[in-house]
Image (cartoon, helix red, strand yellow):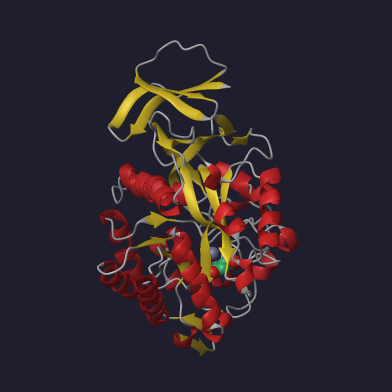
Amino acid sequence: MRLVVKGKLFTARGLIDGSILVEEGRIKKVVKGDPRWPVDEILDYGGRRGNVILPGLVDAHVHMRDLDLSYKEDFYTGTRSAAAGGFTIVADMPNTRPRTNTPRALKEKENLARNKALVDYCLYYGVPSEREHLTEDVQKLAVGIKVYMQDEFYSERRSLVENTLGYAAEKKLLVVSHAEDPAFFVHGPAGTLRTAEAEVSAIKDISGRAKDLNFRLHITHLSSKAGLEELLKQKRGVNLTVDTCPHYLLLSAEDVRMQRGIAKAHPSIKGRVDAKALLIAARNGGIDAITSDHAPHTVEEKSGDMEGALGGFPGLETTLPLLLTLVNKGILELGDVVRLCSTNPSKILGIRNAGEIGEGKMGNLTIVDLHRKFKIEPQKFESKAKFSPFAGREVEGKAVATVVRGIPVMVDGEIVGPRGWGMNAKTYG
Ligand code: DOR
Ligand code: ZN
């Protein structure tokens, strides 16, 4: 299959009007102008104002659910949601049922994903309950180990966590941390408040371990200004990276009060001052990446009071439009979005030949229309979870096509790629 994509290309050398030839899944040529290559398919965005061809977006934190939680989402619907939102690779968290923390569960998830996914994927491994479950399959199939610091076992089974972190250091596996220390949660009548102090304490703890044991650490979904300040302090002594999510940049505790359970997330959405500090850091490099934390639930699971509702909401179809809206407002540059959602997440996850448009790289592309205006309408989501704290927002900017290894999987909002096309991006050569 030979695909040509024409238009304004976002390359490491800047924006060029040109053409990309993708052959057998890889970018074969990137040239200026419009050569007449004999090809099977052409996506032509040349001369269209507002269309830009970006390196394929990568989301380093999603929950595809599936297995016993497939009533919330599965690998097919979740990756349709990714394709619709412009994402070419999604990294799936291990808090599924069953948990992805045994070699057997990991292999089972790999098979499931390979058969169902529309875009490429990475799999995280959870802290296992036995040392014997840290096997070669983990190195082969998992992109990293996810540590939920707020879980009981983190404090109760320190030696097991220590073993796992030591293993990650030895095998050079990434450790991704949900950094919240429950000792600093405040339980009140309006539900549990996950404070900034909880984030600060956990960042101190896990950074100290990264320093001692020498594993590569990534802190995910940073939510507070105090957490950011602590993190920047730690970054001077430890090689660590960090991401945040659109909801921590654009919503505040006030929005959560109004939307109640729908906007509930873990960590909790903090104040306006926090959102502003995170946004500045996303622009100036203090924050390395943006993830969606796509966390589907049913509407019933999100209703009720703040204590009863589950945390999280779908984000794959809102992340890029929200960020492009910031670009249109002059708050971010398009280059920031590419760095935060493609180049850096590819590097953080150690995915080879991704995150850049260049000869020899994978043929993963996200084509955007910077000026497409629309209203976020969750009932139109590909995700099974048809709600969002951003419902009703007017946004400007959207993915109009998503290409995974040379195959268009979404064009003009239609899912056109085959189920099962996705592969584990850890195995990219
Ligand atoms: O809001 C959240 N939802 N935060 C998490 O850490 C987990 C996630 C989920 O799995 O629903
Ligand atoms: Zn999550």
Task: Note whether 73 is above or below 163 in the view shown.
Answer: above
From the viewer's perspective, is 73 left or right of 159? right
Q: Residue at x 47, y 12 (%)?
A: 37
In this orientation, does residue 149 appear? no
> Where's residue 411, x and y in %?
56, 32
Of 85 and 239, the residue lying toward us: 239
Residue at 31% across, 35% down: 12
Instruction: Report ligand 1 position as a quadrant.
Output: bottom right
Q: Quadrant of residue 142?
A: bottom right
Is 212 drawn above or below residue 365 in the view shown? below
At horizontal 46% and vertical 56% (from top left) the residue drawn is: 291
Residue 75: image location, x then y, percent: 66, 50
In this picture, residue 237 sits left or right of residue 66 = left
Residue 370 spot, x, y in % from top left: 40, 38
Instruction: Say whether residue 51 is visible.
Output: yes
Quarter of the picture containing the N terminus is top right
Toward the viewer: 394 or 288?
288
Residue 28 in picture, x, y percent from top left: 44, 24
